[in-house]
Each structure stands twice: as structure tokens, then as C-alpha cells.
Image (tube, helix red, strand yellow):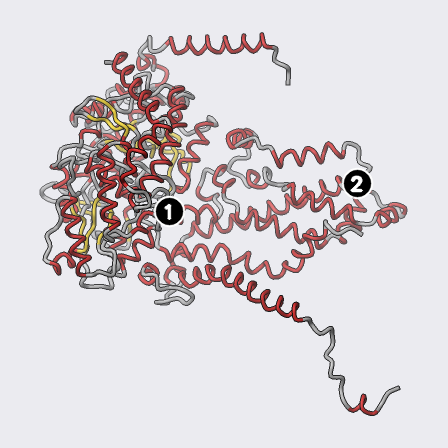
Amino acid sequence: MFLLSRRRLVAAAASALALTLGLTACGDDSDPAQELSANRSGAMENFKVGDQFKATEPVKFSILLLNNANYPVKPDWLFWQELEKRTNVTFDQVAVPGSDYEQKRSVLISAGDAPLIIPKTYHPSENAFVSSGAILPVSDYIDLMPNYKDKVAKWNLGPEIDGLRQSDGKYYLLPGLHEKAWQDYSLVVRTDILQELGLQEPKTWDDVYTMLKAMKAKYPNIYPMTDRYSQPRPTGNLYNILGSSYGAPGGWGFNHATWDAASGKYFYTAASDKWKDWVTFLNKLVSEKLLDPESFTQTDDQARSKIATDKSFVITGNAQALVNDYRADLAKNPKAQMKKIPLPIGPAGEVNPAPRLENGVMISTKAKDNKNFVAMMQLIDWLFYSDAGQEFAKLGIEGTTYTKDASGKPQIVDSINVVGMHPKAPKHLQKDYGFYNGVFAYGGKPELVQAFFSPEEQEYQKVLNARPAAPWVVPPPAPFTDEEREQATLWETGLRDYIEQQTLRFILGQRPLTEWDKYVTELKSKNMDQYMELQQKAYDRYKKEHG
Amino acid sequence: MVTLDAIRRPARRKRGIRPTRGYRAFMVVNAIVLTGVVVVTLYPFINIVARSMSDQAYIISGQVNLLPKGFNLSAYEHVMKDPMFWRNYRNTVFYTTVATVVALVLTTTYAYVLSKKHLKGRTFLVAVAVFTMFFNGGLIPNYILVTSLGLKNSVWAIALPNAISVFNLLVMKAFFESLPMDLEEAAAVDGLNTYGILFRIVLPLSKAIVATMVLFYAVSFWNSWFSAFLYMDKQELFPVTVYLRNLIAGSTGAEMAGAIAETDEAQVDATIKSVTIVLTTLPILTVYPFIQRYFVSGIMLGAVKG
């Protein structure tokens, strides 16, 4: 350890500052995509939409592979073999257990040891890696990806993609694209009880309230509704779907600042009147003993056990939970019927609050120095974004794993099971063949996304797809700079914890709703106003710089 | 003077001192508390074993407590049929053995050396060890260090970085210090060099402490998953603890904003989880009773002097 004299320290700081300024000033003078002549080895000369990508020589790319315990990775999967046959590409796989994928990814990227292709990345987790320069600003290279550009244009995803941009105007994640927003989670109810009570399926949240009251009248000793998804935060799903119906989503969909299209400003979600309204609604349900107060803290297994033993009739869930959990648990009760009803409507109107972008792929900066870089981008474009590639990743090989009927609808062959379609089949599409894998297969047009949905689920999706997108789902970009992000993260943590705590107290009646204004003042003392100023500044700045 | 009475009638007093009332009260309370502790500790385990042999539906409706309901061994069949489970199990055994041997050799030699008061630089060596108890390089620097040494994807990534537990080191050092110097001096007079003394005099006397350390290290390496998770890139190299963790914490490992990808939501059956837990803890359970008698005396060995 040498002693730093003050002068040396200042000199070091000044030179570091100058270097940083110099680098940032450099910006994009030259178009990065032009200087790729050294990286075209193995790439196709003329790769267009609808072309089958095939590398001109066998190439190998390292990829971070999430190992899902339900269908662990096998080296003999037909997926790998067919991929090599069609594209001349093999993967150098770095296997990571699904339980700790984020942590390993973060360690590998920070240590500079990350593989070239890093899939299964949910926005905004790529934000943490932007400033270190470890991942590539992919927006500079989308000219190499014709299928991606085609879908973004065809499906009008421009505004959504803009939401991914960082303060330098570029984005660092290649998102999964959905043509139609896929709102999977909703309320699941016992339709046999509805029949028994002569009730219709509820359409709005007020209808839900009436239904629960009727159930309570007939069965006064139980809580008609319970809930799950409370680890690590209370009812992540319920807060999201209910909050979305009011225009201020909480839980899984929570963002501190929500965009209000009407006024053209961001507002602080958890201090708004919309938030107060749905908290009041839940408080009503709890105080009238319609909603199980343990919903907010119990484990999923406890919630399932209440449904299975007729202690509750209503819960939230998605299609998989309906089939794999609730119906399976109620199998011993032949009278019981469960159905997922379309998302109940609230004051925000008939909206579909699901985003159309989902988890995607990050590229390591080291890829740019790889001689097969262009071939790699073309492969990613084909596999993740072309119609043929998406079909391949999800369904497999036509004739072997699936067939198409006269109308072009894909049918899985009888000897293969997937999502419970052929439960007695000897083989499983995911476990034995490697298709329909969450790492490679997601997004696309609704016919593909919903290919194996049951008829009832397709009915449900038809209703949801008809609803227009919720206006706050596509906010204008307002990215933070690194210093702002650091400061914002500090504030966000304190705010989020406080909000969760107090929201639960309001709902359970431990804190009277008359103290709402006091609560908003308490949020102010936790830097809520400064946070909103920061957000507004970021929005104004981005608007000025990038229009 | 012995009377006839004394011979004919056996002494009424039983052997030992008659316990006082206070002591008897203590014994009763003690028994109650200890029974409570046993029940609280044993119940979850028996519950898991019962679940592993029960039908899924009964588990969900909360009917399984101490005895399996809907007894079937299908979950066991299912887990044991998975070749990866056995592969990982073998890995665990292999890693634990190698790591324990390495750890034991290193700790014993380091502790023995430190126990010699005439060693020059002894305080420095002790300080180096204790320093690592308080300060740590951090996750990323450790990762970079281990990878740049080329230890990734090998058993050494698990065995070497965690080879010496300073706590164990200090216990062993205290034990060696408690051995009488005269023995070693006598051996030296008879012509044994340092290694000879170590192997032929000191180690045979240290069976208890060595057995304790074997137990400590073996259990710790058996349960460790983090090093393997961090430094292994291939599924075939994972120990069974990583397999188990992926099974149990798999799809709920991170809070994901928005929709969870449709294919990943299905949670693994409760029965499968229980079976894997049982199979992973079984070996330690069977080994423990045999080494247990060293365990109690071993801990105290470093403490009592003279």
C-alpha cells in the first residue's frame, strides 16, 4: 500500500474523469455494423426473412442454459441434433440450475466469464450490466437480424421496444416478442358452487364482491376466497391483476412510477387514489370475512390445500395452475369444477394489462470479437424470431413430433405428451425431446403461443385478446443514467418495503384507511417526491435528446 | 460387629445418594423439556419420511402427519430411475471424500505446526488464519481467482478453497498443545524425527479429535452446494445437493415481474421433493451414531487442560 498524496489523488481522479468524459463523448460516430468484415466467417451472404439459416461452416457458440428441474437438459435431445442438422450450429452449454439462475448469471458477467449468448433475461435485470460494458448494445446490430426487424414492424412493437432503451438511446436486450398480449393470470372459481347458488360468472370486481357475499351467506363458516403467490411478497398476483384493473398495478407488475397517458406525466403508483381504491376494496373483502387474511402470508401449498378441502372456492392462478394444481387436487371430488374466468373489469375499463415483450437474450461484448459474430446474430434471429425457428423450438419436427391438420393447426402426435394433452403417452415433448423449452420457445403469433392450449383456454384468450392494451403498459422511455440509477435503487428499496408493509396493514384493517393522507406524507419523508423528480428529469432529458 | 440381622435382611438403602426433592423436581422438568425438544426436532423429519411414501392428494389436503396415507413407493421409483440423480449422488460421495481427506491433512499439519511454541513466526501464521475468519475477498474476486487457477469444473474447486476451517484449526491446535511434551521429547531422544513423532506418537493419540474433524468436515462438504453451483458448468458434475435445490426451489427462485414463462410454472410434486430429501440425508444419519461418541468428547478436548 503506497500512501496517496493528496496531489496524486486529485490527479488520478481528474484523469479518470477526463477518460470517462472522452469515452462518452466518443459515442457513435461510426456505424458499428459496418466494421464487421472480420466477423463474417460462417455467416450467410444474403440472409432474409423466411430463409432457413445455415452456417457455411460448422460453428460453436457458448450459451448459458437454464436447467429446469421439470425437464433437465439431456445431451441426446432431438432438439440439439436437429438444430445442428438445419443450421450447422452446436452449443457449448454452461448449465445453471434454475433455482439460482440470476445469481450465477450475475457472477459470470461480472467476472468477465460469461458465455456469448445469455437467454432467459427479464427486463429490467439487464440494466445492472449496462454500465460495466459487459453486454452488447444490441440495438446497433439489428440490421443483421431481418426476422426480428420484420416482426417489430409488423406487430407495431416500436413503442414497447423504446421502453427498453437506456440513457444512451440504445437497448441491450433482445426481448421475446408477442403479437398479442398474453394475460395468463386471472381469477379461478368453483363453477359448481356458482351453479348451486344460481350465480353468473362475475364480469367486474363488483360482481366478484356480490358472488363472494352470496357464497358466504350459504357457507358462513369459511372464507370464500383465498390466495397464493405470497412468497416473497404478499399476493404478488392478486395485487397485480386487481391493481391493473384500477390503473395502479402492484405485486408482480409493480413499478414505482406509472405513466398516466391522460396527463402526460408519471405518478407515484402507491400514493395514488387508484391504489387507495383497490386497497379499500380488499379491505372490504377482508373485513367482511370474504377473503382469507392468511392469503397474504401463507405458502402456495397451504392455499392449494384449502381449495382441495373445500375451505375456499375462489383463488387466483393461470392455465397451468388450473390444470396441474387445482383440478388435480380436486380430482377426488367429482362434483367440483374449476374455471379461470376472464380478468374481472375495474375502473380502468376493459383493458389487457399484459406486456407484449417478455424475457429475452443478452449478448456478451466478447461476441463482437468472435470471427463468427455475424453468423451468431443470424442464428439468434432465425431461432428466436423467424416463424420457422419459433415453430421448431416450440413444436419440434413436423411429421415426427407434430402434424398439421387441414386448417394448419398443429397437433402433437399421440405418443408424445406435453402440458397434459396425452397424459398416458410414453414420451414427453420437453423431457425426452427438448422442445417447448422455456429457454428457446416463447413469444410469437397467437396461433403458435396458444398452440396447445385447451379449448377453454383459447376461449379465455379470445376474450382477453379482444381487449385493448392498457395505456400504462407502454410508457415513453425515461432511462436513468448510472448515478441516477444508483440513487434511485437506494430510494426504491426503502419505498418498496414500506409500501408492502403499510398496504398489508391497511388491507387487514390494522391501520384505518382514514390515515391514508398520513401514509402519503410518510412516503414523502422516504424521498418519494425526489424519486418522482428524478423520473421526470429522465423523461424530459430523453425526450430532448432523442425526440 | 456383624449381627445376624444384617446378614439375613438385605440393606434397605439402594446404592447411591438419595436424591433431594429439588433434584427430583429438576429431573422431571428436565425430562419434559428434553422430550419437547426431541419431539419438535423429530417431527418434521418423520413427517418428511411419511410424505415421501404418501399419495400426492393426501399431502395437499394436509392429512399426512406421522404416518403415510395412500402408501405407495412410486415417488421413490421415479427418483431412483433418474440416472442424473445417481450420477450426482456419486459426485457428492466423491467430492465429500476427496475434500474431507484434503481438509483433514491440511488442517492437522497446520494445527500441529502451530502447536509448537518454539516455532519462529508462529504468531504470524496464526494471524493469517484468523484474518480470513473476519475478512473475505468477496464473491467475484474469489470466482476470478479460482477460475484463473484453472480449478473450474473439477473437484479441486470444491476441496481447496474451503479446505481449512479456522475454527476447526484452532480446536485441533489447542488439542495438540494439551498433549504432554515429555512424550515427544522421549521419542526424540529415541531417534524419531518430526514426521516420525507426528505419525507414530501424536496421531495415534489424537483419534478422538481426528474423528470429530472427519465428522465436521464430511457433514459440511456433504451439505455444500454453493461452491459446486458456482464453479461447475455441467450437470454431470453437480452434487446431489444442487439437484435437490433445483427441484425444490426451482421455479420460485426469483421474483419475476409479469408473466412467468408458460412452460416453467409447473411445480414438482411434494412427494418427489420429500423422497429426494430422505435419500440425501440418509447416509449422514446412518454414519452419525457410530461417530457420535467422539463428537461430544472431541469438542471438549481442546478446552480442558491438564
- In the rendering, which numbered label is found on residue B205? none
On screen, residue A7 versus residue A95, left or right, reads right
- Dot 1 corresponds to which residue? A69
Chain letter belonging to callout 1: A
The answer to which of B156 and B52 lies nearer the viewer is B52
- Dot 2 corresponds to which residue? B116
Instruction: Residue A127: give x, y in percent of width and height.
Output: 36, 26
Amino acid of disc 2: Lys
Residue at mark 1 shares a chain with residue at mark 2? no
Q: Is residue A323 visible?
A: no
Instruction: Residue A347: give x, y in percent of width and height.
Output: 15, 37
Task: Kindly report the distance in space between the C-alpha atoms of the residues bearing marks 1 and 2.
Answer: 52 Å
Q: How many marks?
A: 2
Q: Is residue B25 visible?
A: yes
Q: Residue at x 41, y 29 (%)?
A: A115
User: Badge 2: few (under 14), some or many (20 or more) residues near its Cα, within 10 Å?
Assistant: some
Chain letter belonging to callout 2: B
Q: Residue at x 34, y 14 (%)?
A: A37
**SS assignment at label 1:** loop
Instruction: Residue A466: give x, y in percent of width and height.
Output: 11, 37
On screen, residue A438 versus residue A128, left or right, reads left
The answer to which of B302 and A49 lies nearer the viewer is B302
Q: Residue at x 33, y 34 (%)?
A: A120
**SS assignment at label 2:** loop
User: Badge 1: few (under 14), some or many (20 or more) residues near its Cα, within 10 Å?
Assistant: many
Amino acid of disc 1: Ala
